[in-house]
Each structure stands twice: as structure tokens, then as C-alpha cells.
């Protein structure tokens, strides 16, 4: 293994209504044996925090002291500093969207790894794990491991909170079949340890491994009689082979291990999905990867029993026949057993304030990190939108045809009608939601409409995701014209008026690939590019092959 350091590397009509290592020896600063309770968890969070997060907390205290002692000018400067750090750590929060967005840097990558402390981003390039500065794209360090490199814990593109969780250790799985290994590194790229993975225990088509947080390794073992790959002479044979009566997907077990010792940390509790069809357990594309296509002559179907997810906040298995997730402390995170009501990723995710939003039937539960339910909504999905960190108390949720604001105790504050909505942005001043051919802003207290954008004619439109700096919102606009393919673009609007305030940025031209997801990392706007431009089908296992950071000109 080698090591290097340093280096460079919507046309709308607008209508207005008014983690560092610590003394405990845990590489992620985890709790020492025998230490429990809220006070200890607070200490551990302080130890895991990067330098910037610690400065934010100290800055808030300093502002209060300076104001009380008459240091108004210095307090104002510190307040600006605290505001900047608040945006850096807010899910979907960007430092500034004031102006035309231009490229700051671009990187071709072979995979996304994880977020590092103090504005770092770890990516895979060939056999190397590379740490980049998010602000500039400059290389921090590079560690050479092996081919077929996969590192994590990888934050999911649909979870803004996970991109605000920097990690103190990176776990990487690498090597060819029969010679796989796992390596754990610290946030500076130094190798903590390495273990060879016995092929009899970790290899073969019915086993899978994935990196996880805190030096963990996720392992799935399937007991199935399904063939690993089937080649078809015709489309008709797809149904003859995979839909014949009596064919079953089998069973799956998932465990979380210590990556270096192999010691079992927990076994994931999985629940069976309803209405399972064996063909759901295969990628049916002719290239063995495109799950929506039915192979023609000479096509092949490749067994795909599910995706292991080791994220900064949780472990999960997104399977064709079973589903389950848990925190790293082993607290269950619900079961999305009816996928018809949970079509999108992520079905479970962390929320601000040490909360988790987890599935329950067609609704959701908001629970604390120890599993205590604080809100149960049988017919609504709680949203975790982009924010500038000022969104306050309560929750926002959606049904199939409405947006609902709720108090902490579940009492309804207001609701607004909308077709197939999602909540995109939430601040102390406004809630922005989007549905088909409609984007609207509401007063967070009483739900009165601030503004709405709706096309009189033209293509069908939907806003897929968004980021915010508290005053503006940048979103991904998907448009379906009457003829031709769908198009993607970035647009920026003023949150007070709904008016566009910057030129649109086309996606799919040049280095900016089509994407449905925007990501905010350490206050910077990151645009991912997927392999084969999988913008419409990108899920938790989709390969990221390019990263571009955009910022307003002159910022």
C-alpha cells in the first residue's frame, strides 16, 4: 500500500399572495466501556466533532459573552461566523446561492466514499482512496489499496443529514474474487488495520460485504436455490423461467462485524416484503445491470438479492424479498414491507435533533436515537427537507395529495392541497413544497400561501431536490416535453417572492451529467454524475462517476 499527501489536483407564470480518535481508543471517538447516559453521549459527540463544529459551539458562547460585556462590533463579527458555520452543518445548507452558478471544480471518480471532518470528501479513484477539499477540489492525501475498491460509510444522496456527518474512520473492501480484504483507515488516510476475507465465509454469489461506519463491515448471506445468472433465448423465456410457480427467493441474514477482528456486533432484524415476485430478484437488462429492461435474444438476468447499506447513520438491507435497518447501537429503524407505498430512497433516514424517520406501513414514525417513538403518522410521510438550520420545532409531512405541518405532539397546524408533493425547503420563514406542475411557498405558522408557480402550458414539470442558503433555493427541475427526451436543469429562486434570480444551468451538457439529486457538503453545492447517466433510476447502489462543485460567480 502506498501513501501520498498534498497535491493539486423553469418557465413558470408567477402568481403572488401576500470525528477524531480519542482517549477511549475507539477510532471514531465512540463511547468507552461502561459509560452511558445523556451527559456521556454529549461528551462523545464533542469528541467526534470536527474543529469547525467545535468552533461553532464555542462561537455561540462567545457571542453571548461579548454582547453582555459591550463588545458589540466583535460580537457582530462572531455572529456572522456562527451563521456561516450553521449553514455548513445544516442539511442541504449552502453558504451562498447569490448569483449565477459556475463550476469551482470537477473530478472524475470511480466511486464515492464518505465525508471527512473539516470539509473533506473521500472518493475512490482506481485502486486509490483519495481525500479532497470540498471547497477547492485540492487533494489532501491519497492511499493506495487494491482494485475493486469500495469504501464507506457512504452517505445516501437522498439524505441531507448524512452529508453533515463527518466520520473518523473509513472502511474499504478491495481485491479480486478469492483474495478480498478489508482495510480500516483514519481520517488522515493512515491505515489502522487490515484483514483478509476468507472466501468460504465472505465470498461466492450468495454472499455480499459492504463497508460501514465505526470500523464496521456489513455481511449478507443468502440461502437461495436461484441461479446466479440466466441467459435467455427470447423475452418469453424470461417469464417461463423466473415466474414459474414454486420458485422462491429464499432467506437472507445480515450481520454487522468489526472489520478488523470479525467479531459480530449485531444481527439485522429483517421483515419479508409483501407480494414478492422472483423476477424482482434479478437485474433483467441485457448488460446485467439495467433492472427496468427485459432482455431480448441473448439477454441475461443476473441475481440481485439486494443492496447492503452502511451509511454514516445506520445499517440497512434493501432487498428484493426482505427489508430492515438499524442504528449502529442496534435500535431497529422500521420495516418498509409494502414497497408500493415506499417507492423512493431513502425509506428511512436520520433527522435533525437526534431523531430518525422510519417506515410503518404507508406512514411513518419519528423516533429518538434510542428507539422511543415521539410521533406516529399512519398515513403521512415525514419529510426531512433542505434547511438553513433555522427551521424550528415541529414536522412537515406529505400524503398523496397534501402537505401537512405538525406540532411536536402531532397536532396539525395546517395543510395545503398538492398532487404528489414533497417538501423541498424549510426555514424559520417559509416552507417550500413541490408537486406536479406546482411549486409553492407557505407561512410555516399558519400555512398561508406566500407565492405559487404553475405553468399555463408546456411540458410537465417536477422539482426533484433542492438546497438553500436561507434566502434562495436552487433546485433540480425535471421537464417532460411533448416530444423528445426529458430534460434536467438547475434553477434558483428568491424564497421571498418565488422569482428566478439566476440563469438556469442545463444538466446533461458537458461535464454536468443529468441528476435528480443535489448535495450540500460543508456549505458547498455538489452535483453528482451517475454511470450511464442514471438520473431517473439512481438508487442507493448507483455508481457515482463524477463530482462538480458549483458556486455563484465571485464567491
Image: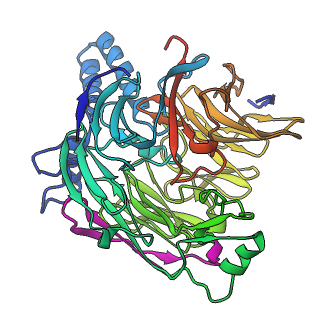
In the image, 382 versus 341, the foreground residue is: 341
| Rendering coords of residue 472 (x, y %) | 59, 26
Is 258 one of the magenta-colored residues? Answer: yes
Q: Residue at x 66, y 19 (%)?
A: 502
- Residue 283 seen from this side: no
331 in relation to 552, above or below: below
Tell me: 517 left or right of 44.
Answer: right
| Rendering coords of residue 294 (x, y %) | 72, 64
Q: Which image quadrant: the N terminus?
A: top left
Is 249 one of the magenta-colored residues? Answer: no
86 in relation to 28, above or below: above
Tell me: 2 left or right of 108.
Answer: left
- Residue 464 seen from this side: yes
| Rendering coords of residue 501 (x, y %) | 67, 19
249 in relation to 19, above or below: below
In the image, 482 versus 244, the foreground residue is: 244
- Residue found at the far left of this picture: 23
In the image, 121 versus 447, the foreground residue is: 121
Dividing the picture into quadrants, the one containing residue 295 is: bottom right
Q: Residue at x 55, y 75 (%)?
A: 321
Q: Which residues are magenta?
A: 251-279
Q: Residue at x 60, y 68 (%)?
A: 282
- Residue found at the far bottom of this picture: 246
| Rendering coords of residue 330 (x, y %) | 32, 67
Tell me: 460 left or right of 365.
Answer: right
Amino acid at each position: 500500500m502506498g501513501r501520498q499527501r498534498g497535491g493539486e489536483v423553469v418557465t413558470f407564470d408567477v402568481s403572488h399572495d401576500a470525528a477524531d480518535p480519542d482517549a477511549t481508543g475507539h477510532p471514531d471517538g465512540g463511547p468507552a466501556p461502561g459509560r452511558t447516559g445523556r451527559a456521556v453521549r454529549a461528551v462523545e459527540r464533542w469528541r467526534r466533532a470536527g474543529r469547525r463544529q467545535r468552533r461553532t459551539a464555542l462561537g455561540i458562547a462567545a457571542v453571548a459573552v461579548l454582547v453582555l460585556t459591550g463588545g458589540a462590533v466583535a460580537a457582530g463579527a462572531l455572529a456572522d461566523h456562527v451563521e456561516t458555520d450553521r449553514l455548513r452543518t445544516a442539511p442541504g445548507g449552502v453558504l451562498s446561492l447569490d448569483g449565477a452558478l459556475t463550476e469551482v471544480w470537477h473530478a472524475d471518480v470511480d466511486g464515492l466514499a464518505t465525508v471527512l471532518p473539516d470539509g473533506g470528501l473521500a472518493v475512490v479513484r482506481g485502486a486509490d482512496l483519495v481525500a479532497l477539499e470540498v471547497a477547492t477540489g485540492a487533494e489532501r492525501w491519497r492511499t493506495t489499496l487494491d482494485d475493486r475498491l469500495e469504501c464507506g460509510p457512504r452517505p445516501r444522496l437522498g439524505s441531507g443529514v448524512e452529508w453533515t456527518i463527518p466520520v473518523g474512520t473509513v472502511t474499504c473492501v478491495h481485491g479480486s474474487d478469492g483474495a478480498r480484504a478489508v482495510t480500516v483507515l483514519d481520517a488522515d488516510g493512515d491505515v489502522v488495520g487490515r484483514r483478509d476475507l476468507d472466501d468460504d465465509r465472505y465470498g461466492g454469489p450468495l454472499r455480499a460485504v459492504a463497508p460501514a461506519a465505526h470500523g464496521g463491515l456489513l455481511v449478507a448471506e443468502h440461502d437461495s436455490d436461484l441461479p446466479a445468472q440466466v441467459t435467455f433465448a427470447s423475452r418469453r423465456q424470461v417469464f417461463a423461467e423466473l415466474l414459474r410457480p414454486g420458485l422462491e427467493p429464499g432467506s437472507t441474514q445480515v450481520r454487522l462485524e468489526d472489520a478488523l477482528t470479525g467479531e459480530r456486533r449485531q444481527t439485522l432484524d429483517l421483515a419479508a416484503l409483501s407480494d414478492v415476485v422472483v423476477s424482482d430478484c434479478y437485474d433483467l437488462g441485457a448488460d446485467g445491470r439495467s433492472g427496468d429492461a427485459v432482455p431480448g435474444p441473448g439477454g441475461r438476468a443476473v441475481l440481485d438479492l439486494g443492496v447492503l447499506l452502511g451509511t454514516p447513520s445506520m445499517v440497512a438491507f434493501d432487498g428484493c424479498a426482505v427489508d430492515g435497518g438499524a442504528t449502529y447501537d442496534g435500535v431497529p429503524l422500521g420495516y418498509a414491507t409494502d414497497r408500493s407505498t415506499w417507492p423512493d430512497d431513502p425509506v428511512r433516514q436520520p433527522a435533525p435533533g437526534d431523531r430518525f424517520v422510519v417506515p410503518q406501513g404507508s406512514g411513518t414514525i419519528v423516533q429518538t436515537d434510542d428507539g422511543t417513538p415521539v410521533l406516529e403518522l399512519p398515513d403521512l410521510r415525514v419529510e426531512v427537507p433542505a434547511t438553513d438550520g433555522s427551521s424550528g420545532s415541529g414536522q412537515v409531512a406529505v400524503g398523496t395529495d397534501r402537505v401537512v405541518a405538525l406540532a411536536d405532539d402531532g397536532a396539525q397546524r395546517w395543510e395545503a392541497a398538492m398532487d404528489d408533493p414533497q417538501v423541498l425547503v424549510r426555514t424559520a420563514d417559509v416552507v417550500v413544497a413541490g408537486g406536479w406542475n406546482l411549486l409553492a411557498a407557505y407561512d410555516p405558522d399558519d400555512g398561508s400561501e406566500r407565492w405559487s408557480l404553475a405553468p399555463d402550458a408546456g411540458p410537465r414539470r417536477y422539482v426533484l431536490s433542492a438546497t438553500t442558503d436561507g434566502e434562495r433555493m436552487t433546485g433540480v427541475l425535471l421537464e417532460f416535453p411533448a416530444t423528445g427526451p426529458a430534460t434536467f436543469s438547475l434553477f434558483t429562486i428568491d424564497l421571498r417572492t418565488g422569482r428566478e434570480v439566476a440563469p438556469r444551468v442545463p444538466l446533461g451538457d458537458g461535464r454536468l451529467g443529468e441528476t435528480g439529486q443535489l448535495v450540500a457538503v460543508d456549505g458547498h453545492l455538489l452535483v453528482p454524475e451517475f454511470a450511464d447517466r442514471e438520473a431517473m433510476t439512481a438508487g442507493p447502489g448507483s455508481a457515482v462517476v463524477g463530482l462538480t462543485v458549483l458556486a455563484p460567480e465571485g464567491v
